[in-house]
Image (cartoon, grey):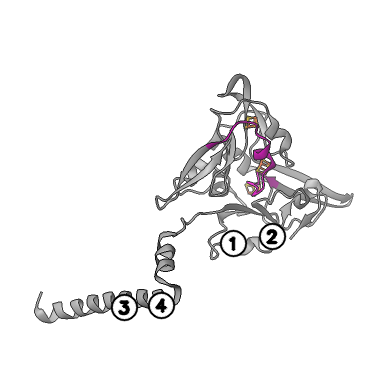
Amino acid sequence: MSDAQVRPIIRRETLKRLGVAVGAGALALVMGPRRVIEAACSKKPRLARYAMLVDLNRCIGCRSCTVACKAENQVPLGVFRTYVHYLEEGTYPETKRYFAPTFCNHCSEPPCVTACPVDPVKGVYKTSRGEEVEYERRATYTRPDGLVLMDYDRCIGCHMCVKACPYGARFVDPSRKAGGDPSNNTVGKCTYCVQRLDNGVVPSCVQTCLGGALIFGDLNDSSSEIAKKSRKAKVWKPKEGTKPNTYYVGLTHEAVLGEEVKS
Ligand code: SF4
Ligand code: SF4
Ligand code: SF4
């Protein structure tokens, strides 16, 4: 490399460093040096807030989502993590049919978690950037990215969480014993396919959906499709105060899911 090529790079680097120093100095003048150091140290980890959006106008009721979920998560016969309701409205011949897929809503205020009597322990969640975030972990718990999950090893099979869920999203798992008390069976529910999410892959139902009715993503990413579409979407049973993270578009009839809805 000749001198002529080296000099501009050095000049650029020098100017860049000078700019950083001047910028830090200016910030220190405005905020005070202590607050500048505090601001640099308090860099919050970037957490996702996972959510699902169901567009009922696109759902064709094929139940591929249910089958894909069963296959991915080895869901036993007779119970479902994803269920598509077939609903009818009106009187013959003026009738309409609707399809409404339902999952665990991964609520932000989940009564199933507060109902769990198992003592909480400290959990550590690692973000995709390697940042560590501590959280409280009962036998069922909310992970810092919003997923409501189960710890089968600590579950005592009391089924309080099943009773506490106003959506019927949990079931007693006929195929799995509770680690905390193997004389009981533990509980199953949708996890938004956590094993896939942690490897950067969307839930199985979303990947399989034939109608393109399911959108999954991060609400904390304001540019994501789900963040934009969920602003005008509705949630199921808003009066329960659970703050669901599963949204519905086209949920206009009280008959659908048997409850009024709100924007
Ligand atoms: S839908 Fe039910 S099981 Fe899922 S988080 Fe909400 S209350 Fe809990
Ligand atoms: S069944 Fe398990 S997860 Fe549910 S409330 Fe009881 S101990 Fe907690
Ligand atoms: S796979 Fe998609 S289109 Fe088929 S029932 Fe499920 S949500 Fe509806």
Reading the chain from its start, which is encountered first: label 1 or label 3?
A: 3
Reading the chain from its start, which is encountered first: label 3 or label 4?
A: 3
Left or right of 95 in this view: 179: left
Q: Nearer the viewer, mark 3 or mark 4?
A: 4
Residue on which disc 4 sits: 29
Residue on which disc 2 sits: 233
Reading the chain from its start, which is encountered first: label 1 or label 4?
A: 4
Residue on which disc 3 sits: 19
Q: CA distance from mark 2 to mark 3?
A: 45 Å
Which region shows up in magenta? 101-121
Q: Nearer the viewer, mark 1 or mark 3?
A: 3
Left or right of 15 in this view: 6: left
- Horizontal and vertical percent position of residue 191: 57, 41
Work out whether residue 149 or residue 193 is closer to the camera in this orientation and state it: 149
Q: CA distance from mark 4 to mark 2?
A: 45 Å
What amino acid is found at the position of numbered circle 4 in the picture? Leu
- Horizontal and vertical percent position of residue 123: 50, 40
Q: Quadrant of residue 110?
A: top right
